[in-house]
Every structure is written in C-alpha cells, then in structure tokens.
Image (cartoon, rainbow, N blue to C red):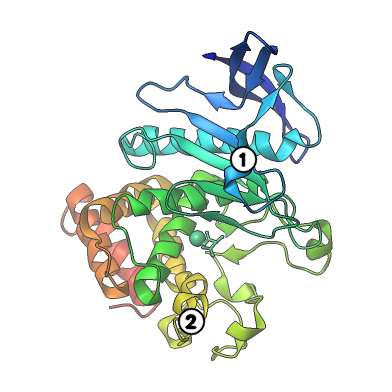
Amino acid sequence: DEMRTQKGAGKGVHGDHKEIHISQVKNPNSGTKFALADYSHKDLDGILTYDAKNDNDSRNDTLYVGDSAAFIGDYDRALVDAHYNSEKVYDYYLNEHGRNSLDGKGMAIISRVHYGNNYNNASWNGRWMTYGDGDGEFFISLSAGLDVAAHEMTHGVITHSANLVYRNQSGALNESFADVFGALVDDDDWEMGEDIMAPAAKAEGVTRLRSLSNPNSVVVSNEQRRAYSTNGGVYPDHMDEFYHMPTSVDGGGVHVNSSITNHAAYLIGQEIGREKLGQIYYRALTVYLTPNSDFSDARRAIVHSAIDLYGEGSAEEKAANSGFDAVGIY
Ligand code: ASN
Ligand code: ZN
C-alpha cells in the first residue's frame, strides 16, 4: 500500500465539523480508500487511529479506513475526535515544550477507539491510548474530551520522562500531572471531563469528573473510596483530607489524592497564568522528578524549576511556594 497524507473532513461526537489529516490507501484490489493516518508531521512516525470494534482484544483492531475523505458517519465520530485531539495534544507538546511526541523522539501516536461495550473509561497502557464509548448514562464517547486525550497522552509523556510509579504519592503525582496538562491543553477551564458527561449524569448535577479549581465540589464516585475519606467522600484539596487507602484500592487512591496537588497547580496558575505554569510543570516533570518522587519532592522540583526559568525571588517562585503551602505540602 502507498500512503500519502491529505486533508479530510470529520464530524465529531458533539456534531462539530473539523479538518483532519488522513491518508490515501491505494490498493490494486479495493481501489482508493482513506485511513485515519496522519503522516504530515515532520519527524513523527504518524498519528494513527484504530477501530477497536467494540471488543476487548487489541489484536482485532485495524487502522480505521473509509471509502471517502469525509468521515461524517455516526460510527466515525468517536474515531474522528480521537484522531483530531491526538493532533492537538501533539501540537501542544511540540509548540509549547519542543517535545516531539510522547517519547520526545517521534514515536507514533496510536489510539484505539470503540473499545469494549459501553466502556466508561480511557487509558494509556504504556504504548497506546484506548477509549471506550461510555454507557450513554454517565459518559458519552471518552475521546470527545480534549482534556481526556491530553490526560491519557500525558501519561505517555510521563512514561518517557519521570516515569512516576503508579501507586501512592508517586502515582497521585502521575495522575496529577496528567490532569494539569489535561487542563492546560483544553484551554478554557480547570475542570476535567466536562465534555464527556452524558445528559443523565449532568441532570443529576455530575457535570465533570474532577475539578482542579474546587476539588471538594466533586463527589468521589466509588463507594469503596468513600470509606477512606475524612471529608464526606469528596475529592481532597489539602493534606488534611488525604485518603489513606491500601494500594489494592486505586493504587492507594492515585485518582483521589491527585486532587491535592491539582489544587496547588490551580492556585499557582491563578497567580502566574497557564503559560508559565505549563513551562514550570513541564521542566519539573522532565528534569527533576524520578519514579519514586513524593509530594514534597514535587514541591521542590516545581520551585526549583520556577527558579531556573524565572529567577530566585521571582513572583513565579513565590507563587509556587504559596500554592504548595496552601494545600499543606512542605
Ligand atoms: N482513565 C484512567 C486514567 O487515565 C484509567 C486508569 O485508571 N488508569 O487514569
Ligand atoms: Zn490517569
């Protein structure tokens, strides 16, 4: 097969029309077809979007191919969003941080979409992203959230940088950096998952998955986790509310305790703006943090990065220190 990237038309989960990069697939037997394969970026091995065909076996997945350059059918929508959002996140890391893909060396960005049945999650498995369709009650297709894609892809960046061990405080930091960059890439708010909540969830007041600005405003959905809370089962915004959980439960609460450092990032961002926050956090993640770093190490790494970039005694350094003071991390 010969492949050449061109522009295509896509329709997303929310009904929005967007331009995507696709490739012509010329095959002597089936004629010309079009694939969700973007080879338009220099030194990048491609942005490739696969159809997981609503099962759990990635060996059945195939690069998504259509008969025309218009990917506007119902089944196309979640695939189009994964493909489009992957490119947005790729562009963010390249333009803001000079990073070429998840590994910094141009590795292919692979998404597998329509995973499982009514699957209410998205993930990074060390090599690629997977997106469920949601059950339509709690979530819609998870690839519809740019912050979700940025969260999962940031797990990929973390794998290839600090490689924070996915349990206890290092795991909560892994989650927190994924949320912080999720929020930074999806430019207008400090909430996670607001674009993937299903109407029924919204009707019950569940309008987002987590909040960096006000973690306490979101209830931790899993009852099991509630058993470990000191604050009525909402996401914590201070070390006084840290969930002490066994590592058998969510790796020791990695998706819960991440909100403490998320809130510190939000507070710092309020002082210095999203742009500088991103620069400082990216440097901390890629230069200073290591697999077993804990919350205090993260504070040191972030303060150190603020000093590197903006100077000793700078407003940025002060903001970093006050942000962590406010959430009880010293
Ligand atoms: N959506 C989750 C995450 O990216 C999947 C998981 O539990 N690892 O953190
Ligand atoms: Zn995560």
Query: What quarter of the picture does the C terminus occupy?
Result: bottom left
260 shown above or below 285 = below
* Residues at marks 2 and 1, CA–CA distance in whole angstroms: 31 Å
313 shown above or below 88 = below
Instruction: Pinpoint residue 53: horizontal percent, then vertical percent.
Output: 70, 43
Query: Judging from the image, what secondary structure is the residue with disc 1 in?
Result: loop
Q: Is residue 193 left or right of residue 124?
A: right
Q: Which residue is mark 1?
A: 61
* Mark seen at residue 248: 2
Mark 2 neighbour class, 10 Å CA radius: few under 14, some 14 to 19, many 20 or more = few
* Mark seen at residue 69: none
User: How many marks can you see?
Assistant: 2
The quadrant where residue 146 appears:
top right
Looking at this view, is 187 or 118 the one in front?
A: 118
288 shown above or below 108 = below
Mark 1 neighbour class, 10 Å CA radius: few under 14, some 14 to 19, many 20 or more = some
Instruction: Pinpoint residue 305: horizontal percent, then vertical percent.
Output: 23, 55
Q: Kindly identify the amino acid type of the residue bearing the numbered disc 1.
A: Asp
Query: Judging from the image, what secondary structure is the residue with disc 2 in?
Result: loop
x 45%, y 65%: residue: 262
Q: Earlier in the sequence, mark 2 or mark 1?
A: 1
Instruction: Pinpoint residue 256: horizontal percent, then vertical percent.
Output: 52, 74
Q: Kindly identify the amino acid type of the residue bearing the numbered disc 2.
A: Ser
